Amino acid sequence: MKKEYESLFTPWKIGNVTIKNRIVMCPMGGTSLFGWMQPSTFNKVAADLFLERAKNDVGLIIPGIAPLRDSIGGKWLYKNKKAFEELAKYMEEFHKTGAKMFVQLTAGFGRSYAINKEAALLLKYKALGAIAKPILDVSYLTASPSVLPSRWDPELKCREMTRKEINEIVFAYAETSRMLKEAGVDGVEVHAVHEGYLLDQFTLKYTNFRKDEYGGSFENRYRFPVEVVQAIKKACGDDFPVSLRYSVISKTKGFEYGALPGETDYIEVGRDMEESIKAAKYLEEAGYDMLNADNGTYDAWYWAHPPVYMPYNCNLEDCVEIKKHVKIPVVCAGKMQLDVASRAIQEGKIDAMGVARQFLTDGEWVNKVINDKEEDIMPCIQCHNGCFALCKYKGVPNTQSLHEVKQMSRCALNPTTMTGDKYKLTPAKEKKHVVIIGGGIGGMEAARVAKLRGHDVTIYEKTDRLGGVFNEAANFDFKVEDKKLIEWYKRQMKNLEIEIKYNEEVKDFNLLSYDELIIATGAKEKTLNIPGIDKAISALDYLKDKEKVGNRVVVIGGGLTGCEIAYDLHLKGKTPVIVEMLNDLMAVKGLCLANSSFLRDYFKTNSVEVYLESTVRQIKEDELVVVDKAERPTNVKFDSIIYATGYTPNPLTKGAKNVHVIGDSYKVGNLKDVIWRAYEVAMNL
């Protein structure tokens, strides 16, 4: 282990509980030990995930939120004694690893509940909601401190929570915590005065307009989380640790509008630093034993779920400030870097480093750090495609089905995460020679899995490098982890001794000798039939050579690629203009709101020119004609034009036998689609 990381591997205490090192596996939705969007049971798949991470030297593990009351059916968790009996047996095995576990319990989501279109109908039409109530009570799940607009469909109003419901939740926290203590759990975490969830909504002035003892003054707004910890301590004793998931600053300008990194001149509608210092002291005095901290709300979601565009260690400065004012430990999460976290711990600025999604990508990463094998860590690229693909765009609430929501906390890069034995690697029954055409990410993943199963593998790559079009996709300054992923795959090819034939374009499959053939030749960029389109360059051309463009650049296509290019242009001091035919930017399924809302807020804050529901009719010498849905034309000046209008599959299969198509050759999608299909195909050879 590097000397600079040593402070990460020193013991510390939360109350009377000693933790062996300073690395905390933070909670993630979908990893609950009691299930997620289904009636509560002991979740063996999640339990196995945590046990494996514990065996790989994590100090403290906090599973994802356990709803106090089932989302489906409405049964209180503390009434499911069987689940706690199974947990008790599990904790005996878990503690053999030397790790500790705090179980996170949630009061709920309030207006942040990610309703999909079906759930939205139940909230909008009370008669339908009444019929569905015994199974799915959306009115209860979205109940908030006051009548508020839903984060996912602002036209829908979430009702005010009753005092009776508040009292029931406080009791449930206490009773569930008591049962967790009896099952051998080391502590609990209260979810949450954090991220704009229900308890946080009570504390924030812009979401709490109550006239009773739970609204108005500072003490009233924080009454709910105070009553929760006091009830837990009364039921479990003062020695039983209670952590609080805590957002230091809300970083929020208003409903559906967050503050960007570096912004200081905005008006904070939520919790600012002055109030946060007061609140942290107040909550410590109430009985909380730790603050598991970062920033943000669902209106500024990218602070708590930082995408690739957010800076590293984005929440550290604010967590350091809070640490100055409390005696209890403070954990900081949010794209934390090992060396930075270790130094902050050594200097007493924070107590531990919180990490979440990297544990989904590579469950052995802590052990690899200890054994000086950092280069073997598969990097999380902050895409959220597998773990939290809760998508929203104008007029459309969360696009995920209930089944898809239940599948959260999978990993785009690692299909084995939280999938039980479905993606378990098994030796091939018959050794075969597998030929793969195309050395992109899909081709390399198929090669890796096939080789691990015992097959002989040869990759034919028509260029002189591996990575395919992902080399261009990663060619942004802010995509550091994407570049690391390419290098990780290259090392896998080398370590597994996979044969790679560079600069060989296969045109006749009959000349190849193979048992199984995998086509991973990618996709072709779509072209536009617009007069003057020859004056434009493609997104791929731009990413290969960014010097090709002038100062004022029109980007045709407001999907993710187009928006990332516009963001890149603006960071470089240029003036991007986006033209998009749909009614919102990045109006695609599977793109997490934390990612898309950052870019939308960035463009809004920086007054980037955006034309929605518009098409380019004609490109002239130095201006193009943009027509809106009412056929009204606007002349837009430009120095350069980039079109980012998508791809079409390019499967070269003519004359092939025993052929399997993967990646964008099979279906154009995101990296999760590419890797998961490559894994499945190679697993079944």
Image (spheres, grey):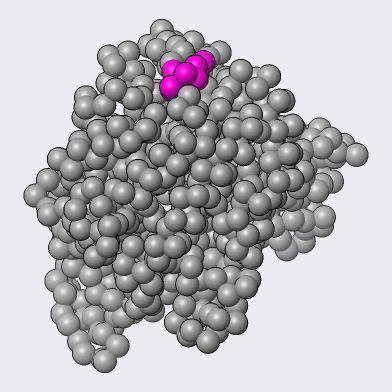
Q: Residue at x 57, y 38 (%)?
A: 178
- The residue depicted at 73 percent of the width and 39 percent of the height is 85
The image position of residue 182, as x and y in percent, is 64, 32
Residue drawn at x 58%, y 70% is: 136
Asked if residue 16 is among those painted magenta in the image, a careful observer would answer yes
Q: Is residue 335 visible?
A: no
Query: Residue 427 is drawn in which quadrant?
Result: top right
Say how many tags the image has.
Answer: 0
Q: Which residue is situated farthest in the left direction here?
A: 265
Q: Position of residue 617 (x, y in %)?
A: 28, 83
Query: Residue 208 vs residue 443: left or right?
Result: left
Q: Nearer the viewer, residue 202 or 172?
A: 172
Residue 396 visible: yes
- What residue span does the magenta drawing correspond to? 13-20
| Residue extending furthest toward the right | 429
Most frequent secondary structure within the magenta stretch: strand
> Which residue is pictured at 43% across the width and 34% down the height?
243
Residue 142 lies left or right of residue 32; in this view the side is: left
